[in-house]
Amino acid sequence: MILLMYIKGKGGIFLKKLTLSFILSFLLFMFVASFDASAAFTHKPGDILVTKSTQCKSGVKCTGLTGHSGIVLENGKVLHIAGPGYHPTQISTSTWYDRYSSTKVVRPNSSTEGKKAATWAYNFYVTGEGKNYEYDIRTTLNGKDGKTYCSKLVWQAYKNGAGKSLATYTPGFIAPYDFFGYTWINGHDTVRTVNW
């Protein structure tokens, strides 16, 4: 109300333009911010999604000590395993971003490798024996022992599907953050960062 009364006085035209500019900027920001994070970006088969949006508590910034990862399949869905008590499952990219707002997308430089990894992941973890695997980090990377975890699932997709052993910080175990920590060695690039 005070601003409107001041606009009617001296310099009113300038303030009207300034106010209109501010309002339009705010509306544009709200319009862009309301878009689904996954809709503004085209994911490709084999894209590795890595998030730190884990171990979050209300009102506390998510730091994600270990992080979480998944792989984009050829059907556009993300294959991941959520944690103890879960089996590998597919979710939409929009569901991924709803659950894990801080995400990096790591993409292989070779789209052929990405497709091969995505195909293997689908054939093994969606329709094959891996669909019944349980979450457990007490397993080997190569092991097909009924146990898997989020980053092992992605690592196996590249190893068994594309014939590529992705580098890790700790031999015998791969953490989600390894996927963007070793992009230059693995022939991958971080192509998108959201709320990191």
Image (spheres, rainbow, N blue to C red):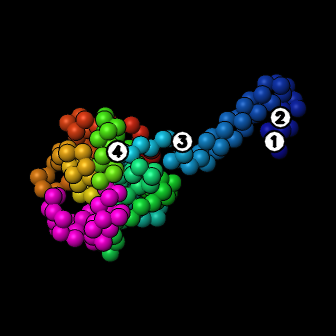
Task: State yes or no: discs 2 and 4 in contact (Cβ < 8 Å).
Answer: no
Q: Residue at x 25, y 49 (%)?
A: 161
Q: Which residue is mark 4?
A: 115
Compare marks 1 and 3 and give the one earlier in the sequence. 1
Residue 138 lies within the magenta run:
yes
Establish if 90 lies above or below 188: below
Mark 3–mark 2 Cα distance, whole angstroms, equals 41 Å
Mark 1–mark 3 Cα distance, whole angstroms, equals 39 Å
* Closest to the observer, 177 or 109: 109
Q: x and y percent of residue 194 in the render? A: 45, 44
Label 3: few (<14), some (14–19) or many (≥20) C-alpha neighbours in 10 Å: few
Kind of residue sitting beneath label 2: Tyr
Q: Which residue is mark 1?
A: 2
Establish if 49 lies above or below 12: below
Q: Residue at x 72, y 36 (%)?
A: 24
Compare marks 4 and 1 and give the one earlier in the sequence. 1
Q: Which residue is mark 3?
A: 40
Mark 4–mark 3 Cα distance, whole angstroms, equals 21 Å
Kind of residue sitting beneath label 1: Ile
The span picked out in magenta is 121-149
The nearer-to-camera label among 3 and 2 is 3
Task: State yes or no: discs 2 and 1 in contact (Cβ < 8 Å).
Answer: yes
Q: Secondary structure at mark 3?
A: loop
Can residue 55 be seen here? The reply is no
Can residue 58 be seen here? The reply is yes
Q: Residue at x 13, y 52 (%)?
A: 170
Q: Residue at x 39, y 37 (%)?
A: 191
The quarter of the image holding the N terminus is top right
Establish if 122 lies above or below 130: above
Q: Which residue is mark 2?
A: 6
Establish if 117 lies above or below 133: above
